[in-house]
Amino acid sequence: MMMPNQANTSNALTLGYDLDMWNEYRVKIPITVDISPDTNSHILVCGMSGSGKSYASLWYFNMLSTAKPDGEFYMADYKGEDAFGFLRECPRYWSFKSTLEALDIVHTRMNARLSGEDKTRNQITLIWDEYMANILSLINEDKKLASVVMNKVSEILLMGRSMSVRIIISCQRPDALAFPAGSRLNYGVVVVLGAALRSVYEMLLPDFRGKAEGRIFGRGEGVALIQGTHLHFIKIPTIRDYKQMQENCIQALS
């Protein structure tokens, strides 16, 4: 559920500021989304290289880590992006071929909660950067393993909400090859940053494509679709205290 004009609370995540209000009036109007366990807060972030999607993932990670201090966070960084370099020594950070370990841990925790073995309900969040590239690499190497991985992701998308398990995925282009059985529709929040290809709007924003096409977006600017019904043009804020943000994320992954 979208809650505009509301300050960030433990159950609200600021996706960005209203882009038009910022450009026209330099007024910061936060666009927020409910992240309480009874809502779909899975997030898909898309954008070409240089669009600011890794920065956006850091922004959301930082906001969640402070909003949910009792939460568990896991980072799967397939390409080992420089943006996440400060996290490489953290025990809950995995890169390249080891990213599947993070997925296995989160998927196992969810199943333990589903079976009743795990009674905890603190929020668990898996942040997976360059998911599409990761899956395509798996498909080339081992199609059966790739299918298993995609099925696990689909299960988290379908059943994670009731078990307080969330996934945040970023990629350049969300092709159906890596998002089987319409799993792209199972994200409560879809963010498309930068100058997206028309096909990306067709895949992710079919009912709002006309509103997004033709707009010019800079780095960290784009479109946010919330629960499939609320469309906003957003600007990802600049992280003023970058060192503090790093400390927050390191602590969350340690």
Image (spheres, rainbow, N blue to C red):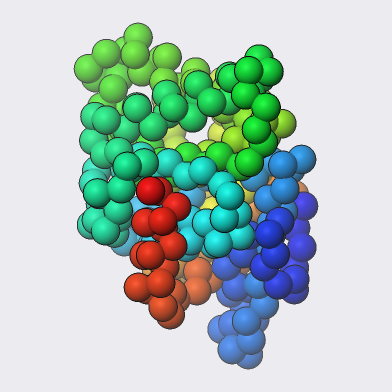
Q: Tell me residue 134's x, y (percent).
A: 31, 32
Q: Residue at x 62, y 24 (%)?
A: 118
Q: For residue 155, what is the image quadrant?
A: top right
The residue lying toward the viewer, choosing from 95 and 158, is 95
Q: Residue at x 26, y 58 (%)?
A: 86
The residue lying toward the viewer, choosing from 45 and 121, is 121
Q: Tell me, yes or no, if residue 130 can be seen here.
A: no
Q: Tell me residue 151's x, y (percent).
A: 49, 18
Q: For residue 17, what is the image quadrant?
A: bottom right
Q: Residue furthest bottom?
A: 25
Up-down: is 85 above or below 215?
A: above
Up-down: is 102 above or below 81?
A: above
The mark total stands at 0
Q: Is residue 118 left or right of residue 180?
A: right
Q: Tell me, yes or no, if residue 33 can be seen here.
A: yes
Q: Is residue 157 left or right of residue 91?
A: right
Q: Tell me residue 106's x, y (percent).
A: 49, 30
Q: Residue at x 35, y 27 (%)?
A: 101
Up-down: is 16 above or below 149?
A: below
Q: Tell me residue 231's x, y (percent).
A: 68, 58
Q: Residue at x 58, y 49 (%)?
A: 70
